[in-house]
Image (cartoon, rainbow, N blue to C red):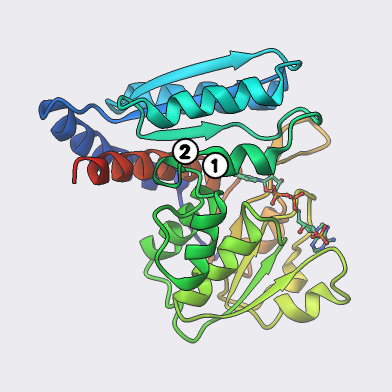
Amino acid sequence: MTATLIDGNALAKRIRAEVATRAAALTARGHQPGLAVVLVGEDPASQVYVRNKVKACEDNGLYSSLDRYPADLTESDLLARIDELNRDPKINGILVQLPLPKHIDSHKVLEAIAPEKDVDGFHVSNAGALMTGAPLFRPCTPYGCMKMLESVEFPLRGAVAVVIGASNIVGKPMAMMLLQAGATVTICNSKTRDLAAHTRNADVIVAAVGKRNIVTADMVKPGAAVIDVGMNRDDQGKLCGDVDFQGVKDVAGFITPVPGGVGPMTITMLLVNTIEAAERALG
Ligand code: NAP
């Protein structure tokens, strides 16, 4: 292996220690930061994610509430609950776990969250503010990727960056953050004609597709930083990313593993956003 491993677990641990200190300071002033997590339906992956988020709050001194609703919850009942949480002073951040059941309009639900409690950064006012440079919150997964690049002092100014995947929650905000850091950014999607022609020229590759081996060693410039957001299962059922780690680690300069890479950083940045929301609420 020639690449330096960017260890998401270790970095997450360091940032969570800072989160715990800030949470304790707020709690000492009588304002324990609080995150409300809302889960609708029985999706097994979502259940694991919300459990991990609630546990991360508990472990680091944040208050958390978990609302679990059956899959047939009506949209208007969900909107009514969000309205209550928007007005609840104990709650600084609200997270509605996606995906929602098909009969509920996710867009409407995300827009119902008060922007100052939108710790996922998905509200259109935060997404728009990310474009113009000063959002209240940055979406947690790309924010975590940026922290990983920062942790190894990867020079982004003037770098060529390729983001593979253009979703609203990962690819697009990732591209925006890289652009703001001074990189020259290309966003690829499923219609991109020759993915390798883009990635081979890149100093930074962020893979956020959800397909195994979308990035192989022959697609990577020697020394590039490769950030793997993808979460897939290999033939043995083990968690793996979008990047062919075994091959790419011998070409890249920096690489993130799956598991133990972007995943723990995503939850960590959710805690950071919640602390920031609480500090802001206190003025
Ligand atoms: P998504 O909404 O399904 O978006 C996937 C994107 O990949 C789309 O923009 C799609 O293009 C693009 N794509 C599909 N096939 C492609 C190809 N062959 N070449 C280039 N682009 C292609 O997924 P997402 O929510 O962004 O998540 C992406 C992955 O990250 C998933 O594996 C997810 O589980 C993982 N994830 C991980 C974390 C974490 O914390 N580790 C957090 C969030 C997501 P079109 O726009 O043309 O359809």
Label 1 near ligand 1 (CB < 8 Å): yes
Kindly tell me whether residue 176 is visible in this rendering: yes
Above or below: residue 85 compared with residue 239: above
Where is residue 155 shown, x and y percent of the image?
42, 78
Q: Residue at x 79, y 81 (%)?
A: 197
Would you name the residue on which mark 1 appears?
263
Q: Residue at x 26, y 41 (%)?
A: 281
Quadrant for the N terminus in the image: bottom right
Q: Residue at x 76, y 27 (%)?
A: 101
Q: Are marks 2 and 1 in contact (CB under 8 Å)?
A: yes
Q: How many marks?
A: 2
- What type is the residue that disc 2 sits on? Ile
**Along the line of sight, the residue nearer the viewer: 122 or 244:** 122
Label 2 near ligand 1 (CB < 8 Å): yes
**Along the line of sight, the residue nearer the viewer: 166 or 253:** 166
The residue carrying pointer 1 sits among few (fewer than 14), some (14 to 19) or many (20 or more) residues within 10 Å by Cα, namely: many
Would you name the residue on which mark 2 appears?
267
